[in-house]
Image (tube, rainbow, N blue to C red):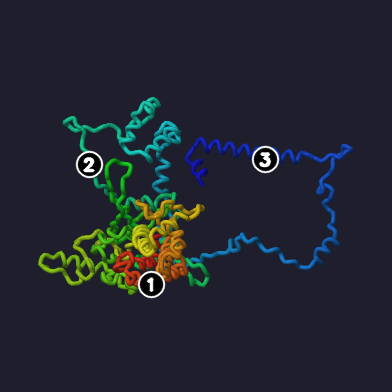
Amino acid sequence: NGVSRHLAQKHSCREKEAQRLAAVSRNLFDAHAHIEQTRRISPDGEEIPYDYDMMPLDAEMDTDINYHLLAMPDVPPPPPPEYATQDEDINDRYVEDYDGVAGMPMSDVVQPTRFEFLARNIPLDNSSFGPFVDEKEWDLAKWIMKSLGKGTTDELLKTDFVREREPSFHNALEGDVMNLNGTPMTETYPLWRRDAIEIIQELIGNPTFRNDIAYFPERAYTNVQGTCRIYDELWTADWWWDKQSMLPEGATIVPVIIASDETQLSTFSGDKTAWPVYLTIEAGENGIKMLCADGFSRIVFPILAAYVADYPKQCLVTCCKSFRCPKCVVPQAELASKKKYPLREPDKTLELLRRNAEPFHINAPAAFITQGLRPMYLPFWADLPHCNIFAAITPDLLHQLHKGVFKDHLVSWCLTTASGGELDARFKCVPAFTGLRQFKKGITSVTQWTGKEHKQMQRVFVALVSGCIPAWLLHITRALVDFIFYARFQSHTTDSLHAMQAALNLFHADMDKVVENGICKDMELPKFASLWFTIAKLLWRWVP
């Protein structure tokens, strides 16, 4: 809770809490000792013994009492209270280990990790808040880093209030660099690149994660018969199990997840933005020796497992045009079709890109056009070993479900069919309750939407639209909201995925009525085509 986090960060408060607990312990001990020393005294001034003092050690128990107890009829024990957990000690997770050899250490020798080596060899000062003078200065620096930009930090540190207290730091950037002409040097924006192998070595060798790293795949079930799978981690999904069989015996897979998104640098001046790619990889076919967090060395194969991005960047990465599916070859006119089309294939796609780039080709290959590809001659994933970029593309729940399907389409349909102002009036009437947000001005006046607002709306949306939209649209609303809630699960089973598929089927059953009633021109949108892949990615690779 919040108190625990505060005590974990505040050294002085932590010491006071320890002193308080020690005082409570002493008081309890003294009270117990006082009770033990207190004896009952009779009016005659003699000590009254306790019951256990009056019974000799060799005394026999009253057999008649035992007989009467044995003769009593069997009375069933009272039922447990309703709030008691009945299956608390019952094992509801059954694991099937990988049937081959995976994650095998190279030897039985345990070595100190890089973190442990540095901890042993780098001397530490006596301060808990170095390089800052004390806890107060550390608190100030922490607040500045979280709340202020570089310019406002310098302004704050130049104020008399701060300067009189003489902190050990005076600005956000130590000094101004001048060029040979004596004028300030211009700022250069560098493109930072890091060796992805070094990043992986640092992560897999961090002893903090010693008990949280999986080195081999497994299959988990909710029952001993193995009829209901559990999907809650990447190593319990199908991708790792299948990839493991393609590698040498004993190999260790390190699944790499890339996430790219435009990030607004809000603590800097102006409109600076950055496009972080959190991890890229170029690993050899033969694996790399790495020292892991448990102290054993293994042959590690970093493999791109998932690429998480919004729809425009999915199209960019997969070299396909907009309004096409970045994962499969479904025609643009069939994006909302219930039919499942095959995934794009990396080898065939690269061949089409190569042929289209040849100078003697006047016209693009027919398949290049029908598959909706765009010219991009050497995508970054072309040489990544064991990588299928089209299978790795993972739907972005925020942009494709919360904002795309729900906010941009479903809410718009309901506002179109409901009478003027009815939905706003219903949202305004939602009573105050823990966990529910009150939209006091309705929803049409909200200009800045985030995933938080979307989730708050979804909690009450089905109940609020009931009665003010047609029955068929209410069925669609319930189906899509159910689907979105299932997609947000942190752990899935075979049963929950079936329920998720049932919600998708219910949506498909009434989907055409949106067009028939003139609410929408067509349903051929990539966001609806990606709904099925949301289920598939949970089965194939667990990336919540």
Q: Which residue is mark 3?
A: 28
Numbered tag placed on residue 39 in the rendering = none
Marks 1 and 2, the one that precedes in the sequence: 2
Marks 1 and 3, the one that precedes in the sequence: 3
Q: Which residue is mark 2?
A: 188
Mark 1 or 2, closer to the camera: 1
Q: Residue at x 27, y 59 (%)?
A: 312
Q: Which residue is mark 1?
A: 510
Q: How many marks?
A: 3
Q: Is residue 239 visible?
A: no
Splitting the image into 4 quarters, where does residue 467 fall? bottom left
Q: Is residue 376 visible?
A: yes
Q: Residues within 10 Å of mark 2 (few under 14, many from 20)?
A: few
Q: Amino acid at mark 1?
A: Asp
* Real-space Cα separation, disc 1 to disc 2, in angstroms: 56 Å
In depth, the one of 130 and 454 nearer the eye is 454
